[in-house]
Image (spheres, helix red, strand yellow):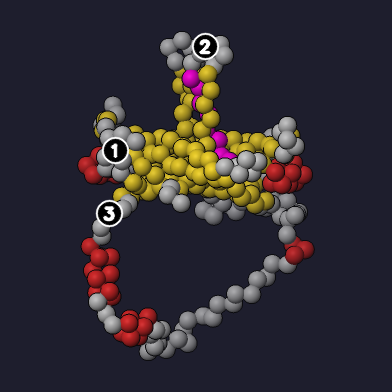
Amino acid sequence: MFSLNRVSLIGYQTQPVELRQTPSGTAVTDLNIVVPTSFTTGSGEQLSGKGFFTVTLWGPMADVASQYVRPGAQLYISGRLQTDSWDDQTSGEKRSKTKVVAQEMILLDPKDGQRSAPAGAELGKCLNRAEVIGNVTKDPEMRTTTGGQNVLTIGVASNERWKDRQSGEMKERTEFHNVVLWGALAEDVAKHIKKGSKVYVAGRVQTRSWETQSGGKRTTTEIVADQMSMLGIANTVAAETVSTRAAMPSRERSAEESPVAVTEPVAAIPEVQYQSDVKVEDLPF
């Protein structure tokens, strides 16, 4: 595996699930998930809002969703971002839409219904997190907003390879992710990242809408990054450890890897019980 394309969501289904069948008989459905969220803007302002996501489920997962997922149900979704493109039949313009292709789905509601959120609790937040490992598609270009904030938009390409079930051939698909960076992170990326750099990106997914000069509505989906790391580069801390351990005789390396004796009293550390209290009859499905 040479790249990563992963998105994780915790949100709520907004409408009834409609199951479809492909010509070959495979079940497929689209969920429409709303994710309430709060975030800090590039200027440090705390905002709250909600994001809407189309999530495509295939096969047995689609069957389960059609049976058990109802409007308002809370779900955990893990999958990959996929952008589909087509030509508009009326205008001939290129159109695209980004969705989540689900690889995991967990039903989060208990059998007796959702609990009321405790007043003032911070534990009821939802999840909107994307992670991408790929290559930067062009040199970054810094822009400045009218409010004086630095903002950078870059493209990151990730590749996916799989074997076609019918033909047995290996196929490959490239996804192009729009990544937005703000403030100090944007400044660091502009200095050190260039076209072709391999990077790790993490942040939240957002979709923006606007109108063209002709009055048409357009949308774009992007990852607003709060973390980016350069990959495939030397690290002085790691290099020092590697060179030191590589020069050790094997006997010394084995001794170093042995568990270290505990010299401090451990009575103050509470014992952790790993036995699960969850019973099968308590599961929501």
- In the displayed structure, does residue 116 sit left or right of residue 124? right
* Residue located beneath label 3 in the image: 233
Distance between mark 3 and mark 2 Cα atoms:
46 Å
Within-10-Å neighbours for mark 3: few <14, some 14–19, many 20+: few
Name the foreground residue: 150 vs 24: 24
What percent of the width, then of the height, locates residue 250? 32, 82
Report the span colored magenta: 94-101
The disc label shown at residue 161, or none: none
What percent of the width, then of the height, locates residue 155? 37, 35
- For label 3, the SS is loop
- In the displayed structure, does residue 257 sit left or right of residue 90? left
Q: Nearer the viewer, mark 2 or mark 1?
A: 1
Within-10-Å neighbours for mark 2: few <14, some 14–19, many 20+: few
- In the displayed structure, does residue 195 sit left or right of residue 71? left
What percent of the width, then of the height, locates residue 136? 34, 39
Comes first in the chain, label 2 or label 1? 2
* Residue located beneath label 1 in the image: 195
Q: Residue at x 28, y 26 (%)?
A: 146
Q: What amino acid is labelled 3 in the image?
A: Ile
Is residue 96 on the magenta stretch? yes
- For label 1, the SS is loop
Q: Residue at x 24, y 74 (%)?
A: 244
Comes first in the chain, label 1 or label 3? 1
Distance between mark 1 and mark 3 Cα atoms:
15 Å
The disc label shown at residue 91, or none: 2
Within-10-Å neighbours for mark 1: few <14, some 14–19, many 20+: some
Say which quarter of the image contains residue 277. Answer: bottom right
Name the foreground residue: 73 vs 29: 29
